[in-house]
Image (cartoon, coloured by chain):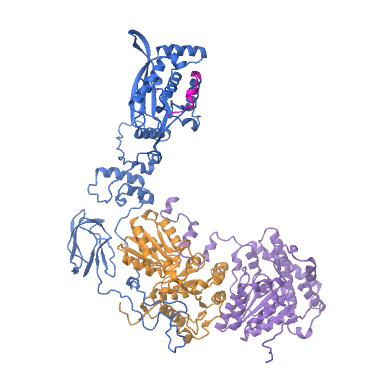
Chain colours: A purple, B blue, C orange
């Protein structure tokens, strides 16, 4: 009997606006409305400024450890552009641009890294989850959130982000499997930025791509240039539509690069080649978009200066808001342990001690 | 009448408060027996409170299965008086339903397979759980009891137990009404006089040493005494009238007291006394004083005499190891010299006294005494003696019954030399006589031996040439 | 006891099924998921008949992935559903530990109340069923030690139904341990309609005055047997909720009796009995007439079933502890 082909597939790589400024008019048609682009550019300028200022805040002791998003602005923004207000963004910590576009107040991000849990109090009406610290665990939550939307028949979906390192975690696999097997309306987007702290992506997977991770679950997989807003938005829109139509999840690999250190506590020069960084600096997504928009007459230097000024002002305001928040009540960390605090916990909170809660504590005064 | 909650399943009857805060009653007489079918209101027992003799009726009908007490017992309110057999509404252990089989069958091919109800092992249906587990309509709360229980720390409860006292009868004066160690102790003292009808099972085994307030007492009598812990009597109350000053009995004073107590309780003391004619020795002493430029007392000479004496009577230069029941005779003479200090008696040690010349001995003693008076003397110089000399004469005493410096076996008290009419070879003269009192531990040193030693010492003191030669 | 018209005699596992059915009829946010829970009705038949009644969208056979089951349940709960995931055996909670303790326990406080996780995780618990390894463990202390979770363990059918419904309605994550050894040990009348019992409230099974015995799960049965054999007047308390602990009931009882024995299947060291012992010592110090004793499994791995009854504390060990405590 001849050997037959049981299954074969292929991973497409989507690029629309490449690093040389070449724009594929066919693929890029109607992906993003031209009149939306100036607002997008302004947003990107502001986000980049906030990211760089956040770094300085940490270095000057005004904020704790902070993971810079610089270089990875496009994938999450593409998702935010592709989804509706009722849809969910379930992110790790390099998706600020998308989260802010989706409605999350930037103060929240700063407060989180300033050690204030009130930063995780996502305002009602903003469908986003807080920063996810344990790696690779949030995609299951996205699957569940999407599952609830499916059960409620709302038509809403979830887009979840994670890095190349996260795809090594068991929970990634379980989430993808659940989503595909139960046909949940969730989009998986892996930001392959080349590094998991100091470990290169080649250690996370022996495969050619990360996109092919999704094949085994039976979900469509695609790879796109993560520094190309148009390519990312296109694949996002396709995936979102598929999910909303009830066809289940899609796996997107966004090929991008972490232009700064893993966090402010890291020094990438210890393990990264300077030449590699230089190569990717040349692929920086913001100048790429800016140059193309300027060439197309959709943006100019004075608009850019204006955006820089207003961005600076907005950043200062946000920092002021975040730093100006009233100090939390000293026993605030008890308040949300449960909907109703059990008596023993109330006692701990009120007495601020765990000892001598025994007999005749009043005698100890 | 205060409420005691009876069990809903009527399995037992709890003795209620029989009238106005009564906590217990004596069971005088049972009026029913085990196996009896009793009717509601039927008298179960006659009980006597401190107010009256009462009849206790059964609150419901039932069959008596157990009488929880014997005639003459004191029953506490809140404890079970009578147990009943199965009442009409008892719960039943459920039988297993036929549908769920416990064992999975091994036959996969059979058509009809009982659902094992589990994928591993077996979950049994026939475990007989006690009927008490099945739900009662009313969620049971913790029932209160009329029984008064004292509040007390485990440590204090331990004391009460050792004193054979029911701590629940002691009123507490501590924080929150808790019973303290003093409360127990006080109760114990009063208890010796009052409370004739104490029904506690254990007889009193009172040890003053165990009362923690007198913690220093712990270290004294207990432990290394060869005599076992004897029961001692509770302290006698002291009449406070006329007291002008109260001095705390602790610290060094207390330690000394303990040491003396121990000595007297271990060694069997006897004392022999004698006097030495030191008329000649006195002349010698004055000579020495003039030569050395140092005022010498008789003490260094006595030390010399004792050292000589020990060579001939080594039995007195010994210490007793009570723990091992051994007598350790010593080769050298480490002499304890009793010194009076502000804190009381101290006994520094003059080491290797047998090697010392008169002046050396005198200087040694002076140094030790000074060290005691200004409390600069180190601990090492206060231990290790094998014989002690106590110069009672310096206070003006004559004879004494000195207490042995435990664990030594003998002690010599030297009185004040006094002018006396003496006789020698028929000649009468006014001479100087030195009183000597020697106490010995009769377990180790017999009377003859002790007397002989004293005689040797006396002889040497009466013969300066032999003493100093 | 006679059964009233609106009650049915049922075993503990049947009470679980009944609880799920009652609540799913009342609240269409309730969704069951787990391995073999749908078509098969659960390996202990705890979800028997539910998929037939409520459909495969509400009683879902999930992939074989404990972390996946819990993680997706967290997402469901965060977004308005009331998931009741099942983990098939307590021995397989390990893979789900991270989702339970890093997320389920934390989302409410992490987001200052914006997100909550009203999820009830059902897990068969404990030994004594002659099973292979990892099907007989007692890990309740691990989860009782995690702030942000609640841990419940009924010992009777009536309690199981009322507590499970209460757990499903609870706004916070509950781990609902079902003592598998007594899944079918006895029956009692259980009301047909939905009802709740308070989480965090113990039950006094029998009243007594000589000493307090505290137990939970299958050990309640063992303790009850021991109490029957003992001549002492034993006050037996069934905790019903492991966390939060009903301190008041335990303490009121020990203040009355002055003596306490705590019984658990779990290994002795660092189990809940140690916590209760500490609590009682601190709060009943002046009432104690004997040290608090802990009857527990040994500090070993639970042996394979040939020796499992050597490991598990039975009425003998409980009675010995009662006697020692009384003699102190």
- Please give left or right for residue C142 compared with residue C194 in the image: right
Q: Which residues are magenta?
A: B345-359
Q: Is residue B175 visible?
A: no
Residue drawn 38% across the image and 42% down it: B213
Can you name the residue that lies furthest to the bottom here?
A1
Seen from the viewer's position, the closer of residues A149 and B84 is B84
Picture coordinates of residue A100 (x, y %)?
67, 72
Picture coordinates of residue C36 (x, y %)?
51, 81
Picture coordinates of residue B276 (x, y %)?
37, 16
Can you name the residue that lies furthest to the top here?
B427
- Please give left or right for residue C208 compared with residue C35 in the image: left
- Please give left or right for residue C126 compared with residue A220 in the image: left
Seen from the viewer's position, the closer of residues A332 and B318 is B318
Relative vertical location of residue A161 with respect to residue B314 in this rendering, above or below: below
Seen from the viewer's position, the closer of residues A48 and A75 is A75
Q: Quadrant of residue B273?
A: top left
Q: How many marks?
A: 0
Picture coordinates of residue C35 (x, y %)?
52, 79
Relative vertical location of residue B298 with respect to residue B78 in this rendering, above or below: above
Q: Does residue B69 belong to the magenta stretch?
A: no
């Amino acid at each position: 009997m001849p050997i037959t082909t049981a299954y074969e597939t292929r991973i497409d790589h989507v690029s629309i606006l490449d690093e040389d400024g070449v724009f594929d008019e066919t693929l890029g048609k109607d992906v993003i409305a031209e009149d939306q682009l100036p607002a997008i550019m302004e947003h990107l300028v502001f986000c980049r400024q906030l990211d760089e200022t956040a770094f300085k805040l940490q270095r000057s002791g005004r904020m704790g450890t902070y993971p810079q998003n610089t270089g990875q602005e496009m994938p999450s923004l593409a998702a935010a552009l592709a989804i509706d207000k009722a849809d969910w963004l379930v992110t790790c910590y390099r998706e600020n641009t998308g989260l802010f576009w989706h409605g999350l107040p930037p103060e929240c991000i700063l407060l989180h890294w300033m050690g204030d849990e009130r930063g995780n109090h996502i305002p009602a009406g903003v469908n986003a989850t807080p920063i996810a610290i344990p790696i690779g665990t949030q995609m299951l939550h996205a699957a569940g959130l999407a599952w609830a939307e499916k059960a409620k028949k709302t038509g809403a979906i979830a887009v979840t982000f994670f890095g190349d390192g996260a795809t090594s975690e068991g929970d990634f696999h379980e989430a993808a499997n659940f989503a595909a097997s139960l046909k949940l309306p969730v989009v998986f987007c892996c930001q392959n930025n080349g590094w998991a702290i100091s470990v290169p992506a080649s250690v996370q997977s022996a495969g050619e791509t990360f996109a092919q991770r999704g094949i085994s679950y039976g979900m469509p997989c695609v790879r796109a240039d993560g520094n190309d807003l148009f390519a990312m938005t296109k694949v996002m829109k396709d995936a979102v539509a598929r999910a909303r139509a009830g066809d289940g999840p899609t796996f997107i690999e966004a090929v991008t690069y972490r232009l700064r250190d893993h966090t402010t506590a890291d020094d990438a020069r210890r393990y990264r080649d300077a030449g590699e960084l230089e190569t990717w600096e040349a692929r920086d997504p913001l100048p790429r978009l800016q140059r193309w928009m300027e060439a197309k007459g959709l943006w100019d230097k004075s608009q850019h200066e204006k955006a820089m000024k207003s961005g600076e002002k907005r950043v200062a305001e946000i920092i002021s808001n975040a730093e100006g928040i009233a100090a939390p009540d000293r026993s605030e960390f008890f308040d949300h342990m449960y909907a109703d605090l059990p008596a023993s916990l109330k006692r701990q909170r009120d007495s601020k001690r765990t000892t001598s809660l025994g007999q005749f504590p009043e005698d100890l005064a | 009448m205060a409420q005691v909650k009876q069990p809903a399943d009527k399995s037992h009857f709890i003795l209620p408060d029989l009238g106005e805060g009564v906590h217990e009653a004596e069971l005088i007489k049972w009026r029913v027996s085990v196996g009896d079918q009793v009717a509601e209101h039927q008298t179960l027992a006659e009980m006597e409170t401190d107010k009256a003799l009462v009849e206790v009726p059964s609150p419901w009908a039932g069959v008596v299965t157990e009488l929880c007490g014997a005639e003459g017992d004191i029953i506490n309110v809140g404890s079970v008086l009578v147990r009943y057999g199965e009442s009409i509404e008892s719960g039943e252990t459920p039988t297993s339903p036929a549908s769920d089989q416990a064992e999975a069958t091994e036959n996969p091919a059979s058509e009809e397979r009982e659902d094992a109800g589990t994928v591993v092992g077996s979950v049994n249906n026939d475990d007989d759980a006690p009927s008490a587990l099945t739900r009662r309509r009313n969620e049971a709360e913790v029932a209160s009891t009329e029984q008064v229980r004292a509040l007390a720390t485990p440590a204090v409860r331990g004391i009460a137990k050792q004193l054979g006292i029911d701590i629940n009868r002691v009123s507490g004066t501590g924080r929150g009404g808790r019973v303290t160690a003093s409360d127990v102790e006080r109760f114990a003292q009063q208890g010796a006089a009052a409370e004739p009808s104490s029904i506690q099972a254990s007889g009193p085994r009172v040890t003053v040493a165990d009362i923690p307030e007198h913690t220093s007492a712990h270290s004294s009598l207990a432990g290394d005494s060869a005599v076992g812990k004897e029961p001692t009597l509770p302290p006698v109350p002291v009449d406070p009238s006329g007291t002008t000053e109260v001095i705390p009995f602790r610290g060094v004073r207390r330690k000394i007291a303990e040491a003396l107590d121990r000595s007297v309780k271990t060694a069997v003391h006897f004392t022999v006394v004698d006097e030495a004619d030191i008329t000649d020795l006195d002349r010698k002493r004055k000579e020495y004083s003039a030569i050395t430029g140092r005022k010498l007392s008789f003490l260094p000479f006595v030390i010399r005499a004792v050292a000589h004496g020990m060579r001939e009577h080594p039995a007195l230069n010994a210490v007793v190891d009570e723990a091992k029941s051994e007598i350790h005779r010593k080769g050298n003479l480490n002499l304890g010299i009793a010194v009076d200090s502000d804190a009381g008696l101290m006994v520094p040690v003059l080491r290797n006294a047998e090697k010392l010349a008169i002046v050396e001995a005198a200087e040694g003693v002076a140094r030790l005494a000074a060290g005691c008076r200004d409390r600069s003397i180190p601990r090492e110089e206060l231990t290790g003696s094998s014989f002690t000399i106590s110069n009672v004469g310096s206070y003006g005493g004559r004879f004494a019954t000195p207490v042995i410096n435990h664990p030594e076996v003998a002690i010599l008290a030297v009185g004040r030399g006094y002018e006396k009419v003496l006789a020698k070879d028929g000649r009468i003269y006014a001479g100087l006589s030195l009183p000597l009192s020697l106490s010995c531990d009769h377990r180790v040193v017999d009377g003859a031996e002790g007397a002989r030693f004293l005689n040797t010492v006396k002889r040497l003191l009466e013969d300066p040439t032999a003493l100093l030669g | 006891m006679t059964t009233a018209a609106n009650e049915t005699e049922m075993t503990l596992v049947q009470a679980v099924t009944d609880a799920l059915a009652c609540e799913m009829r009342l609240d269409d946010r309730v969704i069951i998921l787990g391995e073999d829970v749908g078509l098969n009705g659960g390996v202990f038949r705890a979800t028997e008949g539910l998929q037939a009644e409520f459909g495969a969208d509400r009683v879902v056979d999930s992939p074989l992935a404990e972390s996946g089951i819990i993680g997706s349940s967290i997402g469901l709960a965060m977004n308005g559903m009331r998931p009741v995931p099942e983990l098939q055996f307590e021995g397989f909670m390990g893979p789900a530990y991270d989702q339970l303790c890093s997320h389920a326990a934390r989302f409410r406080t992490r987001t200052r109340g914006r997100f909550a996780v009203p999820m009830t995780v059902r897990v068969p618990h404990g030994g004594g069923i002659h099973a292979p390894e990892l099907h007989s463990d007692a890990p309740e202390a691990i989860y009782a030690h995690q702030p942000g979770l609640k841990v419940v363990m009924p010992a009777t059918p009536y309690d199981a139904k009322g507590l499970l419904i209460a757990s499903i309605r609870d706004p916070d994550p509950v781990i609902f341990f079902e003592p598998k050894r007594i899944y079918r040990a006895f029956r009692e009348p259980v009301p047909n309609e939905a009802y709740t019992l308070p989480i965090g409230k113990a039950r006094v099974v029998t009243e007594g005055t000589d000493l307090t015995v505290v137990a939970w799960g299958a050990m309640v049965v063992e303790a009850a047997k021991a109490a029957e054999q003992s001549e002492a007047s034993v006050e037996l308390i069934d905790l019903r909720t492991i966390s939060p602990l009903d301190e008041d009931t335990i303490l009121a009882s020990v203040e009355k009796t002055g003596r306490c024995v705590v019984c658990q299947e779990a290994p002795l060291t660092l189990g809940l009995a140690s916590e209760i012992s500490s609590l009682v010592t601190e709060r009943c110090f002046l009432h104690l007439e004997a040290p608090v004793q802990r009857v527990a499994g040994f500090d070993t791995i639970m042996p394979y079933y040939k020796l499992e009854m050597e490991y598990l504390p039975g009425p003998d060990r409980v009675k010995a502890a009662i006697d020692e405590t009384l003699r102190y």
